[in-house]
Image (cartoon, rainbow, N blue to C red):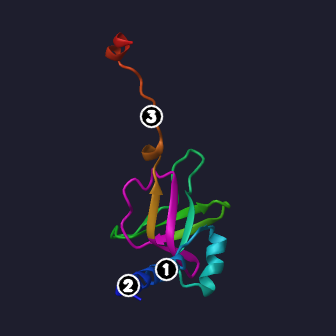
Amino acid sequence: MKFSHILGILVIAVAVIIIISTTGDASSYVNFEQAKAMAVNDSREIHVVGTLKKDPQGHVVGISPSPDKLSFSFLMVDEQGREQLVRYNEPMPPDFLRSEQVVVIGRYQGNSFVAKQILLKCPSKYQENELQPTSQQAQFQ
């Protein structure tokens, strides 16, 4: 065999090994009940998707910043309607209160979920705005 063939086979083998090892780290979205069950015997970080708890008027409730404002906790409701206290050891992300949907990535510690990362879906980023023609555009039509 030529050296270039051996090198090609080694590159392909390394690529296959990398792909297989990274698929083991892939995570799907779960609810809090599944996350609590996974926390018992799984060391991977867990992705939970849900929304912030709101009162009947639509205002976010259950947010408790720490005295130094370097961390905070909040109440999150998963897709099954289960409410859970989530702690985050970083400052509150911008537009957190306006988020439409929240994904927390972390693990259970005791009775609360400790998030290492928070992903937000803000409505302003994803809504299409319908453009209205201006008076100048109307003249050309």
Q: Is residue 51 magenta?
A: no
Q: How far apart are marks 1 and 2 (CA)?
A: 14 Å
Q: Where is residue 86 in the image (x, y as percent from the top left)?
A: 52, 69
The label on residue 54 is: none
Badge 2 local density, few (<14 within 10 Å), some, or many (20+)?
few
Camera-nearest residue between 42 and 81:
42
The mark that comes first in sequence, 3 or 1, is 1
Tag 1–tag 2 contact (CB < 8 Å):
no
- Residue 44 drawn above or below residue 58: below
> Where are the magenta residues, as a range?
87-116
The label on residue 16 is: 1
Which quadrant does the C terminus fall into?
top left
Q: What residue type is labelled 1?
A: Val
Q: How far apart are marks 2 and 3 (CA)?
A: 53 Å
Residue found at x 37% / y 84%: 7
The mark that comes first in sequence, 2 or 3, is 2
- Residue 8 drawn above or below residue 91: below
Residue found at x 42% / y 28%: 131
Q: Which of marks 3 and 1 is in front?
A: 1
Camera-nearest residue between 29 and 113:
29
Q: Distance between the residues labelled 3 and 1?
A: 44 Å
Quadrant housing residue 82:
bottom right
Q: Does the magenta stretch include residue 91?
A: yes
Q: Nearer the viewer, mark 2 or mark 3?
A: 2
Q: Which amino acid does label 3 sit on?
A: Asn
Residue for badge 2:
7
* SS class, disc 2: helix
Q: What residue type is labelled 2?
A: Leu
Tag 2–tag 3 contact (CB < 8 Å):
no
Residue for badge 3:
129
Which quadrant does the N terminus fall into?
bottom left
